[in-house]
Image: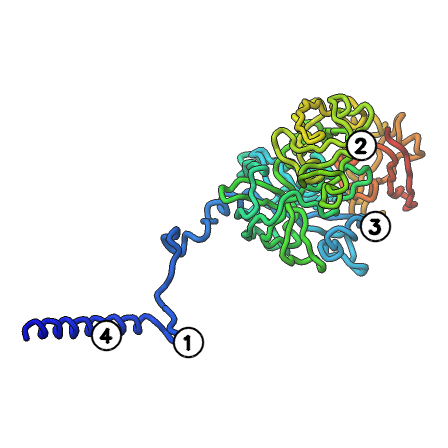
């Protein structure tokens, strides 16, 4: 009897435990269509808490926000480029009914404590006036150091020291899926930071299209929100390093619609260095015609792998020809950086100057070969060019001064530079007489004698002067500068 009592007691105890477990299970479940659903929170074992799912953007934002400036520009006329690039009617706020100078806005990034700023060429090109506004609201007049339409980059400088600036990162190390911040001034809203990830690299979106065919498009694509006014602003990584300069958006209406594009900082570094040191970009060429390799082309050529860039032609006298690269080679890497598209290859070559050597690895008949290639310029040599500023006053053969208030009131104008003395030079040869008040040069307003020097010091080709004589006769003159 005791034996059966013991079994009975164990059965009762087991039942109570089962009932308790069931009650506990019921407490932590909910029923959906009769199926119990667990409600206990579930976490991945690699996460210690919700906050670790995202990086901390506070530090990179604080590093970059004071090094990004607001650029305000004025234009005396509209450049035809503005109609096609980025819907610039809306970007600059101009309309057929707007009076006075056109106005634009963009962003820039301070890259040195002594006032050098990088921005987009389309932000400042043909601007008659550039105002740089810092994040602390200090304002300066900006002067253009140099521009490069082929990469849509420009360097502007302000007279100041001890400025906050961003350090260069390495765009080759940027990974798809990596978090980045876009810092700029969209819609004239200063100091705006947005976050996103890198969604693609080496994108060619066919927007630059320079006449000489030297445009370099190898953009970093992100989904960080970028809008009008962000152009020229910073793309930074989570360490607060500059990895790109924001340049464009993919949009049918000119507003952010999901993707934005930035110029990789490794291209920026080279172009900026050239513009500061030489006032011109030292463009290097491999000297080959190239094409992407897709599945159809690979099948036609009998390639087993879809990798590299196909060499369809090698130019005579080129760097590639001299090194031994031949038609039919497939370029696999430049200085150990893998290239799988024409935009990637052009982006890598654009980082070097004529005379510099690069290691080019190609596939030829299934075998890899390496070539040390000394890059050349467009003329087929390794010479560098430097833009020398012209001494404007002796070239013009004239002495000038800002027109007095009395002269301006009499002529009904609000700005101009008056020719006070004439000697041998371009102005006399063009037929200009003393007393002529220059109001515009190449459609850019002239307010000071320094304006004349800035406009003409790097000028070559035809020049158009507009102005008026003291007897109110308006006159136009043209001449050429070699």
Of callouts 4 and 1, the N-terminal one? 4
Q: Is residue 452 left or right of residue 171?
A: right
Of callouts 3 and 4, the N-terminal one? 4
Q: CA distance from mark 1 to mark 2?
A: 67 Å
Assess disc 2: are there few (<14), some (14-19) or many (≥20) residues with their C-alpha within 10 Å of its C-alpha. Answer: some
Circle 3 or circle 1, nearest the eye: 1
Residue for badge 2: 313
Q: Quadrant of the C terminus?
A: top right
C-beta proximity under 8 Å, tags 3 and 2:
no
Residue for badge 3: 412
Of callouts 4 and 2, the N-terminal one? 4
Q: CA distance from mark 3 to mark 1?
A: 83 Å
Question: Please, what secondary structure does the residue beneath circle 4 have?
Answer: helix
User: In this view of the protein, can residue 54 be seen by the observer?
Assistant: yes
Question: Please, what secondary structure does the residue beneath circle 1 have?
Answer: strand
Assess disc 3: are there few (<14), some (14-19) or many (≥20) residues with their C-alpha within 10 Å of its C-alpha. Answer: few
Q: Position of residue 328 (x, y in %)?
A: 76, 32
Residue for badge 1: 32
C-beta proximity under 8 Å, tags 3 and 1:
no
Q: Is residue 197 left or right of residue 44?
A: right
- Residue at screen point 36% across, 63% down: 41
Residue for badge 4: 19
Q: CA distance from mark 3 to mark 4?
A: 100 Å
Circle 3 or circle 4, nearest the eye: 4
Question: Please, what secondary structure does the residue beneath circle 3 have?
Answer: loop
* Residue 282, picture quadrant: top right
């Amino acid at each position: 009897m005791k034996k059966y009592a013991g079994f009975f007691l164990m059965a009762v105890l087991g039942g109570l435990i089962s009932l308790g477990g069931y009650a506990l299970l019921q407490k932590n479940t909910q029923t959906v269509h009769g199926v119990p659903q667990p409600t206990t929170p579930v976490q991945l074992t690699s996460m210690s808490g919700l906050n670790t799912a995202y990086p901390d953007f506070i530090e990179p934002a604080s590093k970059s926000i004071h090094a990004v400036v607001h650029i305000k520009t004025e234009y005396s006329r509209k450049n035809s480029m503005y109609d096609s690039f980025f819907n610039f009617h809306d970007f600059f706020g101009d309309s057929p009914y707007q009076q006075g100078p056109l106005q634009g806005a963009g962003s820039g990034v301070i890259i040195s404590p002594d006032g050098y700023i990088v921005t987009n060429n389309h932000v400042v090109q043909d601007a008659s006036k550039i105002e740089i506004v810092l994040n602390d609201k200090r304002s300066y007049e900006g002067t253009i150091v140099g521009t490069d339409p082929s990469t849509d980059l420009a360097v502007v400088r302000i007279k100041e020291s001890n400025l906050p600036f961003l350090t260069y990162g390495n765009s080759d190390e940027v990974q798809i899926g990596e978090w980045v911040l876009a810092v700029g001034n969209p819609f004239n809203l200063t100091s705006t930071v947005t976050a996103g990830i890198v969604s693609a690299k080496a994108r060619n979106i066919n927007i630059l299209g320079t006449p000489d065919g030297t445009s370099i498009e190898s953009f970093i694509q992100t989904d960080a929100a970028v809008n009008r006014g962000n152009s020229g602003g910073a793309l930074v990584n989570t360490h607060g390093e500059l990895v790109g300069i924001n340049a464009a958006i993919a949009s049918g209406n000119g507003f952010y619609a999901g993707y934005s594009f930035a110029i990789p900082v490794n291209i920026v570094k080279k172009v900026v260095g050239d513009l500061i040191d030489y006032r011109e970009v030292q463009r290097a060429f491999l000297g080959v015609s190239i094409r992407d390799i897709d599945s159809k082309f690979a099948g036609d050529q009998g390639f087993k792998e879809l990798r590299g860039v196909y060499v369809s032609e090698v130019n005579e006298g080129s760097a590639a020809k001299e090194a031994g690269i031949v038609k039919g080679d497939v370029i696999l890497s430049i200085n150990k950086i893998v290239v799988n598209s024409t935009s990637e290859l052009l982006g890598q070559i654009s980082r070097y100057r004529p005379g510099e050597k690069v290691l080019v690895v190609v596939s030829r008949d299934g075998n890899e070969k390496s070539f040390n290639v000394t890059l050349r310029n467009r003329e087929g040599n390794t010479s560098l060019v430097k833009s020398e500023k012209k001494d404007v006053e002796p070239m013009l053969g004239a002495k000038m001064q800002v027109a007095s208030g009395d002269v301006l009131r009499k002529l009904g104008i609000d700005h101009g530079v008056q020719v006070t003395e004439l000697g041998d030079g371009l102005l006399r040869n063009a037929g200009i007489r003393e007393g002529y008040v220059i109001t515009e040069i190449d459609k850019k307003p002239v307010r000071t004698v320094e304006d004349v020097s800035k406009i003409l010091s790097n000028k070559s080709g035809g020049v158009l002067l507009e102005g008026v004589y003291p007897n109110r006769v308006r006159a136009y003159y043209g001449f050429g500068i070699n």
